[in-house]
Image (spheres, grey):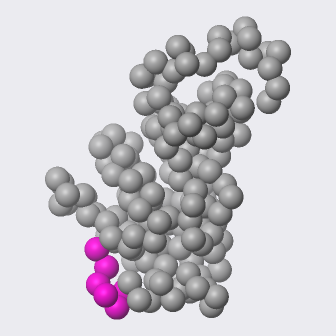
Amino acid sequence: MAQFELGKLQSTAGATALQEERTGFAAFVLRSLQRYTRCDWGDVDDEGIAINNRAIGPVAGRVFAVYRHSSNPEWKIWIITEADRNATTILLPEDYPRQEYLEQPAREPSMGRQIMTIRETATRYGFPEFCIRRLVKTGEIAVIMSGTRAYITSAEFERYLQEGAKRALPPKEVWRGLPK
């Protein structure tokens, strides 16, 4: 669980485009965001670590982290949470001066929102919400926690579907009679 509120998760156009082009980059972003929620600030110096640790304390401040992919060093992202905790933005360093934030979270061409709540995931994929909650509780689907909210990436849910989710979940005919 995150030690501070992330607010609305959003992405710059550059970071979103790279996630759409390269699935490996999307997985890197997810791992980085998971590290971020655990207060692992990535490749920031000692002064940056101290500033971030103070920023998540009683007097909230802006939180900034840097992550580089170990196998693809050209893959580098920044994650910034605003001091008022209303938004966390994933961006490429070259996107920072332009601050071209999307109005909505990162998008994939075929699936719409990339980072979704459990309810949004259930609606988008037509799965009962209780089944998704069970998968999260048993650890079969990785989530990003922000306060009490759990977020799932569409890539993570699709990975689960491709790895045989139909065997683990009841058939659609059964869903209609089950509680949400």
Q: Is residue 171 left or right of residue 90?
A: right
Q: Which of the two residues, 162 or 108, is positioned nearer the viewer here?
A: 162
Q: Position of residue 179 (x, y in %)?
A: 82, 26
Position of the C terminus, as image quadrant, is: top right
**Image quadrant in which you'd find residue 32:** bottom left
Q: Residue at x 42, y 22 (%)?
A: 163
Range drawn in magenta: 43-48
Question: Residue 50 in magenta?
Answer: no
Can residue 1 be seen here? The reply is yes
- Residue 124's x, y, as percent? 64, 32
At x 44%, y 59%, the residue is 33
Which residue is located at x 39 percent, y 42 percent? 20
Please identify the quadrant where the N terminus is shown.
bottom right
Which residue is pictured at 66% across the width and 37% down the height?
133
Q: Position of residue 26 (x, y in %)?
A: 37, 47
Q: Classify 155 as above or below 7.
A: above
Spot the residue most to the top.
173
Looking at the image, residue 98 lies above or below residue 177: below
Can residue 101 be seen here? The reply is no
* Viewer-side residue, 151 vs 100: 151
Across the whole image, how many numbered discs are drawn on residues? 0
Q: Is residue 108 above or below residue 55?
A: above
How far from the left and from the top, in percent, is residue 168?
Answer: 55, 19
Asked where in the image residue 82 lies, by quadrant, the reply is bottom right
